[in-house]
Image: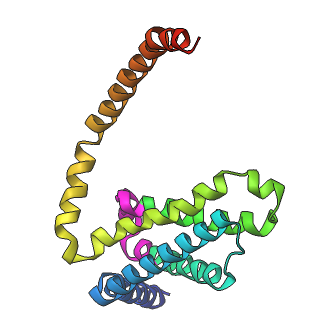
Amino acid sequence: SGEFSSDLRQQRWRWRRWAKRLTTNPYVQQCMALVVLFDAYCNCSDIDARAQGDQVNPTLHVAAGLCLVLYAIELGLILFWQGSVALKDWIFLLDVGVILCGFTEIVMDFFIPEGELAARIGILRLLRLARVIRLLQLLRKTRALRELQKLVTMMSTCLKALAWSFIFCFVVMTIWAMLMVEIIFPLIQEMHR
């Protein structure tokens, strides 16, 4: 019994080492970056077809589903070799959210047919757009984009200041709009008479 549990631990350790080697391999990471780009292309084509009222290409729809399956496999391997440490990484959690959104979209597409109800559900469009967020993984996986990675890091640190800037800009524009309505609109009405 003790020998069996020792063999089991050793087997598990080998599998974890294999999963780590696979997910940290630069060639596999570059291939996953290409999968992310292809998935973004599939999503853009899907969005364009729906905006034009055309039928969505079923091949691209299946390809996007396969990309989602590859994401889930990669995420499962990372969780397998890192364990609970992976749950502390915000990009890992973002990937979990993206994958859950993708599978939720597939389930909703399956159970809710195209038509009135599916057209009214705006969350389906948001779920499609959530998969585009996966493009952020390109920043982590591609060494050639270091400058862009630095730029995104700087932008995320000043995000709070940007949010307050947008709120301040909105308030100023609202005040100007109210002034225009109160002061200039009556003058325009008089000129029109």
Q: In this image, 149 relative to 83: left or right? A: left
Q: Which residue is rendered at x = 42% and y = 13% of the image?
A: 179
Choose top left, top right, bottom left or bottom right for residue 32. Answer: bottom left
Q: Main secondary structure of the magenta part?
A: helix
Does the segment drawn in magenta span residue 85? yes
Q: Which residue is rendered at x = 39% and y = 24% of the image?
A: 173
Number of numbered discs: 0
Q: Quadrant of the C terminus?
A: top right
Expressed as whole percent of the image width and height from the top left, the position of residue 104 reads 65, 63
In this view, the residue in front, 16 or 52, is 52
Q: Which residue is rendered at x = 18% and y = 69% of the image?
A: 146
> Taking the image as drawn, is residue 115 in sight?
yes
In this view, the residue in front, 192 or 101, is 192
Does the segment drawn in magenta span residue 172? no
Choose top left, top right, bottom left or bottom right for residue 171. Answer: top left
In this view, the residue in front, 113 or 119, is 119
User: What's the colour scheme?
Assistant: rainbow
Above or below for 39 versus 177: below
Range of magenta residues? 77-92
Q: In this image, 178 relative to 119: left or right? A: left
Above or below for 122 versus 182: below
Expressed as whole percent of the image width and height from the top left, the position of residue 145 reads 22, 72
Expressed as whole percent of the image width and height from the top left, the position of residue 165 reads 29, 32
> Taking the image as drawn, is residue 95 in sight?
no
Above or below for 163 versus 191: below
Expressed as whole percent of the image width and height from the top left, the position of residue 78 reads 40, 74
In this view, the residue in front, 19 or 38, is 38
